[in-house]
Image (cartoon, grey):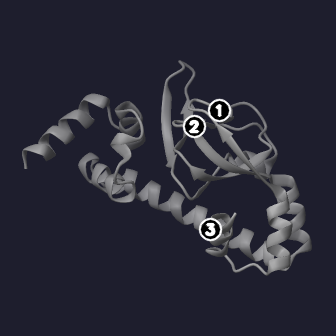
């Protein structure tokens, strides 16, 4: 779990004692492609840290159409944080797009531990700030960047994304159609 410790210490360097308490909350799980980590309409229990694979979060409208909100790659946090914080049914689903290895962390136990351990509380607060900044960047990208710029930004963040997941998931994440993505890629290949 050395990589987990390195990831957690990006937010706050935990003492050995605090890290051990955190580690005791985690369970490494392996799940297959298409596994649903958290389902829209259900109250989630766990927060996840992705060790291997790709996870998407998505909304489903009343007609059953899915809209990708986020893509998660190693090492990143995943899970319906809003639903976990509010202890209410999630408005978002989380699905593994590939076979995945994840650290599952019981959110209620993590919050209890944060109340008892200052190091854990600082790590948790810094992690929340990081998640907020990522969300803010995503909103900026969708608002200000055009489709081609969003595609380049995604390729910069996840260079081999096209070899990892189907194109229609990439298009949905970029908030464009698969046809539009195909046109963008064709135009780029001409240059």
Residue at the image position 30 percent from the left and 55 percent from the top: 145
Q: Which residue is mark 2?
A: 96
Q: Nearer the viewer, residue 53 or 46?
A: 53
Q: Disc 1 or disc 3, which is closer to the eye?
A: 3
Mark 1 crowdedness (10 Å alpha carbons): few <14, some 14-19, many ≥20: some
- Looking at the picture, does residue 61 appear above or below residue 102? above
Picture quadrant where residue 31 is located: top right
- Looking at the picture, does residue 50 appear above or below residue 67? below
Residue at the image position 33 percent from the left and 36 percent from the top: 176
In what element is the residue under mark 2?
Answer: strand
3D distance between C-alphas at marks 2 and 1: 6 Å
Question: In the picture provided, is 74 more to the left or to the right than 12?
Answer: left
- Looking at the picture, does residue 135 appear above or below residue 123? above
Mark 3 crowdedness (10 Å alpha carbons): few <14, some 14-19, many ≥20: some
Residue at the image position 53 percent from the left and 57 percent from the top: 135
Which numbered circle lies on residue 36? 1
Name the spot of residue 41 as percent of width and height, x first: 72, 30
Furthest residue toward top: 63
- The image quadrant where one finds the N terminus is bottom right
Q: Which residue is mark 3?
A: 7
3D distance between C-alphas at marks 1 and 3: 24 Å
Q: Nearer the viewer, residue 40 or 56?
A: 56
Q: Nearer the viewer, residue 176 or 110?
A: 110
Question: In the picture provided, is 67 more to the left or to the right than 45?
Answer: left
Contact check, label 2 and label 1, Cβ < 8 Å: yes
In what element is the residue under mark 3?
Answer: helix
Name the spot of residue 68 as percent of width and height, x first: 48, 38
């Amino acid at each position: 779990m050395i990589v987990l410790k390195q990831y957690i210490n990006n937010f706050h360097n935990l003492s050995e004692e605090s890290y051990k308490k955190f580690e005791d909350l985690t369970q490494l799980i392996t799940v297959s492609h298409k596994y649903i980590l958290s389902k829209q309409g259900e109250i989630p229990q766990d927060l996840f840290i992705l060790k291997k694979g790709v996870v998407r979060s998505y909304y489903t409208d009343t007609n059953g159409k899915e809209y990708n909100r986020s893509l998660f790659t190693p090492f990143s946090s995943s899970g319906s944080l809003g639903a976990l914080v509010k202890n209410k049914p999630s408005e978002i689903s989380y699905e593994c797009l590939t076979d995945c290895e994840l650290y599952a962390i019981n959110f209620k136990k993590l919050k209890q531990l944060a109340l008892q351990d200052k190091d854990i509380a600082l790590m948790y607060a810094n992690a929340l700030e990081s998640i907020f900044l990522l969300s803010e960047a995503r909103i900026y990208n969708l608002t200000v960047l055009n489709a081609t710029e969003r595609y380049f930004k995604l390729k910069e963040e996840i260079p081999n994304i096209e070899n990892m997941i189907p194109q229609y998931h990439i298009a949905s994440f970029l908030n464009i159609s698969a046809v539009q993505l195909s046109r963008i890629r064709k135009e780029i290949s001409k240059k």
